[in-house]
Image (cartoon, grey):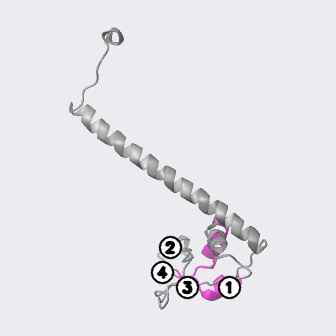
Amino acid sequence: KDSETPGDIAVPALVDEDLGGVVCGYHLAIIRPKARMVAGAYLNYLFSMPKTRYYFFTLATGATRFGLSVGGINKAHFTLPPLDEQQKIAAVLTNADKEIELLQQQLDDLKQEKKALMQQLLTGKRRVKVDEKEVA
């Protein structure tokens, strides 16, 4: 995609299903991995790596809007493990992402709960019992 900064170039997104007649928007590219050579999920993680992102960043061109040509993407060369290993790596990383997402949701829920509790405690809607021994 094109972007206002070269750092936003080549942001990958995995579409792991056939969407029929869907057309890619302007300034986007569809990369279809060769089925017996590259696992799509693995390629998505590979393109998300900081080293790969930096490589595409260096190829971005433009003054106010930056872009990356398909030719620039095609210049990238990667050493790939066997397909079954790619699939296992992608599965491990996908599971890690799911765990992170779950933990992030739990953290967000706890922060919201804390915020509500603070609101109640600091406005006097909820009181706390104070033990006389602790006060003295």
User: Which residue in the protein does label 2 denote?
Assistant: 5
Q: CA distance from mark 1 to mark 4?
A: 21 Å
Q: Contact (CB < 8 A) between labels 1 and 4?
A: no
Q: Residue at x 33, y 41 (%)?
A: 115
The residue range painted magenta reads 50-75
* Tag 4 residue: 65
Say left or right for 2 vs 90. Answer: left
Instruction: Identify residue for label 3.
Output: 29
The mark lying in front, picked from 2 and 1, is 1
Q: Earlier in the sequence, mark 2 or mark 4?
A: 2
Vertical placement of 6 versus 96: above or below? Answer: below
The image shows residue 3, relative to residue 112, as above or below, that is below
Residue 20: say if magenta.
no
Q: Alpha-carbon distance for marks 2 and 4?
A: 7 Å
What is the three-letter code of the residue carrying label 1?
A: Asn
Outermost residue on the bottom side: it is 21
Q: The C terminus is located in which quarter?
A: top left
Residue type marked 4: Arg
Front in this rendered view, residue 20 or 136: 20
The residue carrying mark 1 is 74
Q: Residue at point 63% right, 72% down?
A: 41
Cα distance, mark 3 to mark 4?
A: 16 Å
Q: Residue at x 71, y 65 (%)?
A: 88
Q: Is residue 112 placed above or below 38 in the rendered structure?
A: above
